[in-house]
Image (tube, grey):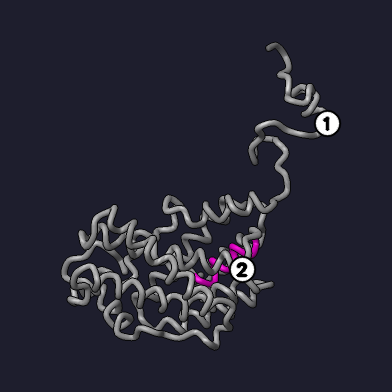
Amino acid sequence: MGDAEILKDGATVTEAQEEGGSVGSEPGLGGHVSAPGPSSNDWLTWQLVDSLLPTGGFAHSLGVEAAQQAGLLRGPSGLRDFLVSSLENVGALLLPFVYAGYQVGSISEWEELDAAMDATLSNHVANEASATQGAALLRVVAGVHQGIAFFKEMRVHTRASHGARSHHAPVFGVVCSRVGISSATAQRAYLFMALRDMTSAATRLNLIGPLEAAILQGALFPQAEAFAALYSDRPIEDARQTAPLLDIVQGGQDRLFSRLFRS
């Protein structure tokens, strides 16, 4: 319509921009970006749990493949029991580290927490998977949220000789805290991602069909919510294994003759 477009209130795009506003602006393109609010925090949460976020999560089955080859997943009921046990184990073992990561206020605190996580994950397969995914998540958020210097500092310390390993649970807690996602949402999201990755792995291993996997995932949401209520906001001193057999089985992942997943 010429040099200026009429907005709903009668002003023009040109007038709005002259007053310091923006219309359809994007970060990094010279536009003004408003401060994060509740709605923007929702979008950030959805981005973090999006399976397309390149953190390598789908290279890991969280023990599903090893359990299948060990004969522990017999029929739909066997898979469901495995998912429930594994989900509780994630809650009991890892949510305390997500919560502690959320409280981190300095690089030294994060390094101390990361070392505690490293010592807790005695299963070498789970330990390596945690460090790999955590480093990948840190790389992604450092690129996406370039204005948050803390993420860049964490990466520097990760790549330093004898530096932090960047385990996933503490990194996820730190990230959620720094981008403004609530602690409760961060811990529930962590459980969701574990359930998402395990059902996805079961689908790719032909243990269950895609539609059936979605139905099973939805059926387990109440159980996941119960675990979130039970294990959220706990100190790392309370972190523990609730499914030691599954942990032992997962430790044999790298010895499988044929495998699709790294863990």
Q: Nearer the viewer, residue 28 or 52?
A: 52
- Report the residue at 29% width, 61% height from top: 201
Q: Nearer the viewer, residue 100 or 113?
A: 100
Query: Quadrant of residue 154 in the image?
Result: bottom right
Classify the position of the C terminus by image quarter.
Answer: bottom left
Q: Residues within 10 Å of mark 1 (few under 14, many from 20)?
A: few
Residue type at tag 2:
Ser
The spot of residue 155 in percent (x, y) is 56, 63
Name the outermost residue toward the bottom.
237
Name the outermost residue toward the right.
19
Q: In the image, which residues are magenta?
A: 169-178
Residue type at tag 1:
Glu
Residue 251 can be seen, yes or no? yes
In the rendered structure, does residue 163 fall within the stretch colored magenta?
A: no
Query: Would residue 250 appear left or right of 167 to someone viewing this image?
Result: left
- Report the residue at 29% width, 84% height from top: 245
The spot of residue 215 in percent (x, y) is 33, 58
Eye-nearest disc, 1 or 2: 2
Query: Quadrant of residue 179 in the image?
Result: bottom right
Q: Give me the disc on residue 254.
A: none
Label 1 sits on residue: 19
Label 2 sits on residue: 183
Is there a contact, CB below 8 Å, between mark 1 and mark 2?
Answer: no
Mark earlier in primary sequence (1, 2): 1
Classify the position of the N terminus by image quarter.
Answer: top right
